[in-house]
Image (tube, helix red, strand yellow):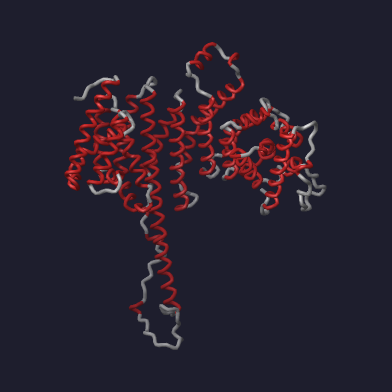
């Protein structure tokens, strides 16, 4: 019999009992065959409860998934997701009623119920992403959006009523996991509706074009095979009754009510973003990183809606992404600043510089690790990069005032502990090129350049200058680009990221780094820069630096010169553009 408790003996005993019951259900479904579909409202929900990774024994979870596959085949479906989609409305109704009861009684939500929500929405979202089932899945998702919104409202009521600052980390992770699965469902619904609307638009446009050509053929007296009335062959007269009816272009015949407004999806995503923004202040790094993934997905979903409206209605259409940025960006930059400060402090302080409390927290693994801080900063920079790409320039002020100073500090920390605070850097950018080159050729610079945070910083800068925000950030290219030149000798992902970032900058302003690239390449700067000449008349091995250089350091110099020459060739290949 089923027992209550948390000991290992009780859990293992309960797992055996639940496994036996599921084995009976499996045998029953095999015996019933296709008639098992009549019993789905009774057996599907309990099996999904046990198949979830939330709150279940691994033995129970594995067997529940196996038995779900057996029931799926008995019912005549190809995949478990197909079975879930067919019973989606029943499952949503049952979950909503359970959540409403918990909210009314102010009782804690069972972890098994949270597991059902997680599995349910992930399976439906994955099923909706299959292109061969677009029409069917779009109709299914559209018919259930209202029920999903109602279920989400009930779930948020339970979360808001039961949440306390001292809630366990496991409970918070379950909530975040549910937010992530619902967000994936909403994104799948938005993508399917947009694709379906584009298909209808293309089909209507093709029909209107064909109708217009028929009308043109009639006006010119051209037959179905392209011959005119003056051709030497017999042709039936075209009577007025055979004249094709003209109904206009066809594109405007569609009722605007058929175009999705995404009102429920926008409200749901904003509700999830608001909770995740609050959870960003939690001390657990794992929760913060998971919330970053959800916030990024939410911004991308809102960006899809904004792009669809812009394509459909023009520049004057409303974009739900812009108010979301204004509301939810402040928690992001607050967390980015604090995490960045903690990481820079962790790099500079030794154990002897820490207080007794900090040392004890470090020994007990209570303090966040340096690797965890780097991962969190990478996630936050990924959000900033995406907002640069999808906000149509709306994010430029926030990037310039909030993100750029943080990136500059970290780049300075890689080159030298005080390089980021050098006030004379902008005024002496050309002379510092070789100085930074010598510093990076040291062993310390090579070690720090392998840090995992350098590549996300470079990708963030690349996205900023490739996006519509790039022209507004052109004033930073001389200083920032010169700051990045010493990193050219690096290989691998970091070296590729440096190369792409500098090319994105040069595409906007190719003159800003031209002189510095000549100095780094080692060639004589042309006396007449206006006259086009081959800048690579020199040899990369002729680069001369002050002082004696080891063979390893000379290889770094040659690599820097080679990369500088490639960038000079890239500048020559750029098409001419108007001056801003």
Residue at (47%, 26%) from the top-left corner? 285
Point out the image quarter for the N terminus: top left
- In screen coordinates, is 369 left or right of 117? right
Residue at (31%, 28%) from the top-left corner? 55
Residue 257 seen in the current view: no
Extreme residue in the right direction: 527
| Above/below status of 257 relative to 544 | below
Extreme residue in the top direction: 356
Observer-nearest of 165 and 39: 39
Residue 79 at x, y percent in the picture = 30, 46
Residue 206 at x, y percent in the picture = 42, 64
Residue 110 quadrant: top left
- In screen coordinates, is 425 left or right of 281? right
Residue 462 quadrant: top right
Residue 471 at x, y percent in the picture = 62, 44
Residue at (34%, 28%) from the top-left corner? 159
Residue 380 seen in the current view: yes
Extreme residue in the front direction: 551
Observer-nearest of 420 and 58: 58
Report how many numbered discs are placed on residues in the image. Answer: 0
Residue 546 at x, y percent in the picture = 80, 33
Observer-nearest of 423 and 555: 555
Residue at (30%, 29%) from the top-left corner? 56
Residue 62 quadrant: top left
Observer-nearest of 548 and 113: 548
């Amino acid at each position: 019999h089923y027992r209550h408790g948390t000991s290992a003996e009780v859990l293992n005993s309960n797992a055996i009992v639940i496994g036996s019951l599921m084995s009976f259900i499996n045998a029953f479904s095999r015996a019933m065959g296709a008639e098992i579909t009549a019993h789905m409202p009774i057996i599907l929900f309990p099996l999904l409860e046990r198949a979830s990774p939330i709150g279940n024994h691994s033995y129970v979870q594995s067997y529940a998934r196996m038995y779900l596959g057996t029931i799926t085949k008995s019912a005549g479906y190809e995949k478990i997701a197909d079975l879930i989609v067919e019973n989606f409305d029943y499952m949503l109704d049952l979950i909503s009623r359970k959540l409403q009861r918990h909210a009314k009684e102010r009782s804690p939500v069972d972890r098994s119920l949270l597991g059902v929500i997680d599995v349910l929405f992930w399976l439906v979202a994955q099923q909706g992403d299959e292109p061969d089932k677009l029409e069917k899945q779009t109709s299914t998702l559209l018919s259930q959006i209202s029920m999903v919104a109602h279920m989400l409202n009930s779930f948020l009521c339970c979360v808001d009523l039961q949440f306390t600052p001292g809630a366990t980390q496991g409970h918070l992770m379950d909530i975040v996991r549910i937010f992530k699965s619902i967000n994936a469902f909403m994104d799948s619904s938005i993508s399917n509706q947009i694709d379906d609307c584009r298909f209808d638009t293309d089909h209507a446009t093709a029909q209107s074009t064909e109708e217009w050509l028929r009308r043109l053929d009639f006006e010119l007296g051209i037959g179905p095979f392209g011959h005119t009335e003056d051709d030497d062959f017999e042709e039936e007269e075209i009577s007025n009754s055979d004249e094709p009816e003209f109904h206009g272009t066809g594109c405007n015949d569609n009722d605007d009510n058929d175009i999705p407004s995404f009102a429920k999806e926008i409200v749901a995503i904003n509700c999830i973003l608001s909770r995740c923004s609050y959870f960003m202040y939690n001390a657990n790094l794992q929760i913060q990183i998971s919330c970053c993934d959800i916030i990024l997905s939410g911004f991308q979903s809102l960006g899809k809606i904004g792009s669809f409206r812009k394509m459909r209605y023009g520049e004057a259409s409303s974009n739900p992404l812009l108010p979301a940025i204004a509301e939810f960006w402040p928690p992001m930059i607050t967390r980015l600043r604090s995490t960045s400060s903690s990481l820079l402090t962790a790099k500079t302080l030794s154990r002897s510089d820490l207080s007794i409390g900090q040392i004890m927290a470090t020994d007990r693994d209570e303090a966040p690790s340096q690797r965890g801080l780097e991962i969190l900063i990478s996630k936050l920079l990924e959000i900033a990069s995406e907002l640069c790409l999808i906000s149509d320039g709306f994010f430029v002020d926030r990037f310039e005032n909030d993100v750029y100073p943080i990136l500059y500090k970290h780049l300075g920390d890689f080159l030298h502990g005080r390089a980021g605070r050098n006030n004379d850097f902008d005024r002496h950018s050309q002379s510092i090129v070789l100085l930074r080159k010598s510093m990076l050729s040291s062993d310390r610079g090579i070690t720090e350049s392998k840090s995992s945070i350098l590549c996300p910083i470079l990708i963030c800068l690349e996205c900023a200058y490739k996006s519509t925000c790039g022209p507004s950030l052109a004033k930073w290219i001389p200083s920032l680009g010169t700051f990045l030149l010493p990193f050219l000798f690096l290989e691998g992902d970091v070296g590729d990221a440096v190369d792409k970032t500098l090319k994105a900058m040069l595409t906007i302003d190719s003159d800003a780094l031209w002189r510095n690239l000549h100095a780094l390449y080692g060639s004589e700067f042309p006396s007449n820069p206006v006259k086009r000449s081959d800048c690579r008349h020199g040899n990369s091995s002729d680069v001369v630096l002050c002082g004696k250089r080891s063979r390893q350091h000379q290889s770094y110099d040659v690599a820097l010169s080679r990369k500088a020459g490639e960038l000079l060739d890239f500048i020559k290949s750029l098409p001419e553009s108007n001056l801003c």
